[in-house]
Amino acid sequence: MSQDAIAPDHPGSPENPRRRKRVRTRGSRIRRAVLLSVLVILIAAGGTAYWLYSRLDGNIKGVDIDKALGEDRPEKLPTSGQNLLVLGSDSRAGAENKALGGGGAVSGARSDTAMVVHIPEGRSRAVAVSIPRDTLVTRPECAGADGSSVDSANRVMFNSVYSQVGPACVVKTVEKMSGVRIDHYLEINFAGFKDLVDAIGGVTVDVPQDIHDTSSGLDLTAGPHKLNGTESLSYVRTRHGIGDGSDLGRIGLQQQFLLALLSEVKSQNLLGSPANTYRIANSATKSLTTDEGLASLKSLTEFARSMNGVDPGSMETIMLPVAYDKTDPNRVVAAQPQARTLWKALREDAAIPETAKRSPATGG
């Protein structure tokens, strides 16, 4: 029997109300299933994105520098650019840091590497001033971790301030010795440094001379080498394999490595690989301590984006001019008038005279 011959009230007729209702009901169920599936996917994606964001955001540890230092700080000049204090700490906290630091022979933590990074107005270039860890400084009166007052002390090693009083006192010490207002603080430990280098696939450096460091096991010939995280950490920490064996010798390697690292990060196609972006961001943030102003993924991202115009190739690296201490030749002191001239140029966002870059201590 043809469809035309089927009576309208026949169950098989397209015009039968019950059949039309079944068709509409089945279509509605399909549409609802599709919409529900899309909704589940969107919720899952949003939940995953939120989890990833929360994890990265929670990685960052913050230190309230402004609260700790109060009002006794250098004036922030309107055209002084931005100044960051960047520390690499040799903390032995955690199994990975302890292993990378050479075991349990040393307790506590020190500022193994310290740089004042000055970014002039316009943020198209930058200057990094390394402070030798063996520099004798006057530690100002500071608030300890428990809130108690820690008296000022003369002729203390710069890298001991971190372990004795904490990061806020390191910032205060730098501000007192330089007169430069520090806007932001960033610190990364051994494990974080190693993981970051591994996350970006290694960093290529041009080794200036053969390095044979029996203490760290670092053995490199002069020329280009692509270093993994562990090798990179040994490279920036070696002091027995280059120069006179003092801290001054490795500062040049640290500055060279910093530029190579920044160039490598800048060249990575992060937007082209979300997984790679997350891996690098996770490595960069999980061992990072900053001031409260940068202690969120949003703030840190905005600050990093504002630095996009800085070309690592044009970044200037300088060691604070120092002279060997007359009482203890194993220690150094800021050389004058070079150091005063250098800090003045940074405060005023001015060009640094060549005479302010010359260091009487030549161990490097």
Image (tube, rainbow, N blue to C red):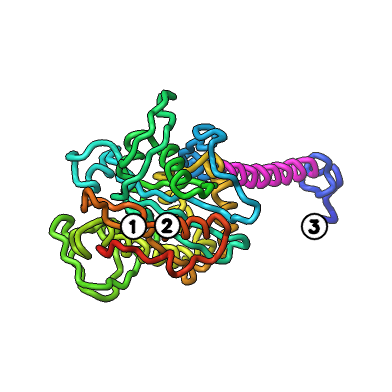
Q: Secondary structure under badge 3?
A: loop
Residue 330: image location, x then y, percent: 21, 52
Viewer-nearest of discs 3 and 2:
2
> What residue did someone put label 2 on?
339
* Image position of 84 (left or right of 208): right
Q: How many marks?
A: 3
- Estimate how packed mark 1 is, as few (under 14), some (14 to 19) or many (20 or more) residues with alpha carbons within 10 Å: many
The label on residue 2 is: 3
Q: Quadrant of the N terminus?
A: bottom right
Q: Secondary structure at mark 2?
A: helix
Please say if the residues under marks 1 and 2 sit with CB atoms less than 8 Å apart: yes
Q: Earlier in the sequence, mark 1 or mark 2?
A: 1
Residue located at (44% from left, 47% from top): 177
Front residue of 199/2: it is: 199
Q: Is 25 or 149 nearer to us in this picture?
A: 149
Label 2 neighbourhood size at 10 Å, few (<14), some (14-19), many (20+)? many
Which of the image's four quarters has the C terminus? bottom left
Residue 273 seen by the camera: yes
Residue type at mark 2: give it: Ala
Q: Amino acid at mark 3?
A: Ser
- Please give the range of residues in magenta: 20-49
Foreground residue among 58 and 165: 165
Question: At which x and y percent is residue 288?
Answer: 43, 45
Q: Residue at x 44, y 29 (%)?
A: 143
| The magenta stretch spans residue 19 | no
Residue 282, given in percent of the width and then of the height, sits at 44, 49
Residue at numbered disc 1: 322
Label 1 vs label 2: CA separation? 8 Å
Which numbered disc, 1 or 3, marks the residue that appears first in the sequence? Answer: 3
